[in-house]
Image (cartoon, helix red, strand yellow):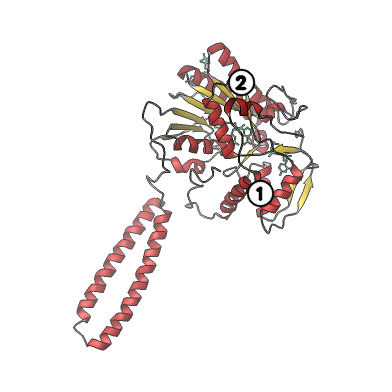
Amino acid sequence: MREMFGGACIISIVSVLLLYNKVQSEDAISSSLDEPEVEVAREGRELDEANTRIKLLEAKLSELEARLPRANSFPETKFRTYRDRKRILVTGGAGFVGSHLVDTLMLDGHQVFVADNYFTGTRRNIEQWIGHENFEMVHHDIVNPLYLEVDEIYHLASPASPPHYMYNPVKTIKTNTVGTVNMLGLAKRTKARILIASTSEVYGDPEVHPQPESYWGNVNPIGPRACYDEGKRVAETLAYAYHKQSGVDVRVARIFNTYGPRMHANDGRVVSNFVIQALENKPITIYGSGEQTRSFQYVSDLVAGLVALMKSDYTQPVNIGNPEERSINSFAALIRDLVPGSGSRIVHKPAVEDDPQRRRPDISTARRELGWAPSVSIEKGLAKTIEYFRKELGRSDNSEKHNGDATEYVL
Ligand code: NAD
Ligand code: UDP
Ligand code: UDP
């Protein structure tokens, strides 16, 4: 509707411009018959006024053009023939990590299907591709079977932030167990390679530091985080059972804390919370003492790691994260410093139950097997993230499309 309105506006402005020019030239012809000097001065004034009005109308026209959806103006993608163009399914592709992965795969010239139920993801995250011939969005809940013909599956569908995965714990378990069975069944039938997005949460509150893949973890099976932690542990178990029993080609990424543009503003994770609090001059809320640590990786580093793992021949779990570790206290201070003029105070709230106290990936497997290591510094990644949230918080109109194009967030 808005598009039709925008189009109609442009057509009427163009008609007004044409009509105006016509009237101007007719006026010029008739006035040339009147008294010469007075008439010349009058015409001069009128012409100036007319030019000013034309300039205003032209400015309005370009403003309206800029607001029209960029039909057929997609980011430039690599051309691939049928021989090397893959059909790739990204479950959870409308979410934070999934949407960045979709950008990378689309730019690389593949045919990409997204299956998402929009629980925590949005169409806005992938609007840059809607209508592209290589892209298809399937509104689907992976707890139900899905029949598609694909060559690769990145299985990311699952709520990821503690408030989201605790919102409906039973659904979180179903998504990670029943949903994963369905995706492994799909991989088995189509002989597709499947990458499971697992998590550092499989290590629970770790007693080994930093965490190598060989560590079996310390998870409370009945605590508030169990729906997610145990759900992901079962997802891994399922992957290797399908591998052993049916020869399914599996990859398992254990993803550590990741941040960047398109994180859900309301997901309650520490990065989005602190950045938004600092931008809005609200108190920055540290849960507990703030001595607990995390290691944060920027999203484009993660996407590069996932793509490298999918390409590699290594079938055991691989940690993908940034080993630079910080306390939550120092992280709060860093974010406040990176938002100039922020008047936020730092306050402490009660600790949350079963909050892991230390977390840092041992990434020697990823370095050795994938030749991968993160490259984006925390300052650079946070600056991009702050810029994104500043824009999002300032947005006041649905027509302000384009949640960043497909390349601006790759650092
Ligand atoms: P996100 O919440 O932004 O994205 C998850 C996506 O999955 C959303 O689009 C959501 O709508 C979709 N989804 C959820 N349940 C679904 C269902 N039943 N059927 C279909 N779609 C469903 O989270 P994210 O940060 O992008 O995480 C993506 C994946 O990476 C998750 O599997 C998560 O466990 C894993 N991971 C993320 C992090 C991190 O720090 N971001 C860390 C470890 C692991
Ligand atoms: N499945 C799916 N898409 C497919 C193939 C299978 O969603 O293309 C689902 C199907 O619903 C099944 C599950 O994956 O329940 C597991 O498949 P599998 O072949 O392992 O099990 P089976 O069908 O033998 O129970
Ligand atoms: N945290 C915090 N304040 C917040 C949000 C989170 O102090 O507003 C803490 C949280 O208790 C945890 C760390 O930051 O120790 C990371 O939390 P997040 O939810 O981002 O991820 P996860 O606990 O899953 O690693």
User: Which mark is first along the chain, 1 or 2?
Assistant: 1
Circle 2 sits on which residue? 316
Task: Estimate the x, y position of residue 51 in percent, counting from the top left.
Answer: 34, 72
Q: Amino acid at mark 2?
A: Gln
The residue shown at (71%, 33%) is 360
Q: Identify the secondary structure beneath mark 1.
A: helix
The residue shown at (39%, 51%) is 3
The answer to the question of whether label 2 and label 1 lie on touching residues, with beta carbons closer than 8 A, is: no
Please, which residue is most extreme toward the top here? 245
178 vs 116: above or below: above
The residue shown at (49%, 51%) is 398
Circle 1 sits on which residue? 275
Q: Please give left or right for residue 405 compared with residue 28 in the image.
A: right
The numbered disc on residue 355 is none
Name the image quarter holding residue 350. top right
Q: Identify the secondary structure beneath mark 2.
A: loop
- Label 2: how many Cα within 10 Å (few below 14, some 14–19, many 20+): few
Q: Nearer the viewer, mark 2 or mark 1?
A: 2
Separation (CA) of disc 2 from disc 1: 35 Å
Evaluate whether residue 42 shows in this view: yes
Q: Amino acid at mark 1?
A: Val
Quadrant where the C terminus sits is: top right
Evaluate whether residue 156 shows in this view: no
Task: Estimate the x, y position of residue 269 in percent, counting from the top left.
Answer: 67, 41
235 vs 347: above or below: above
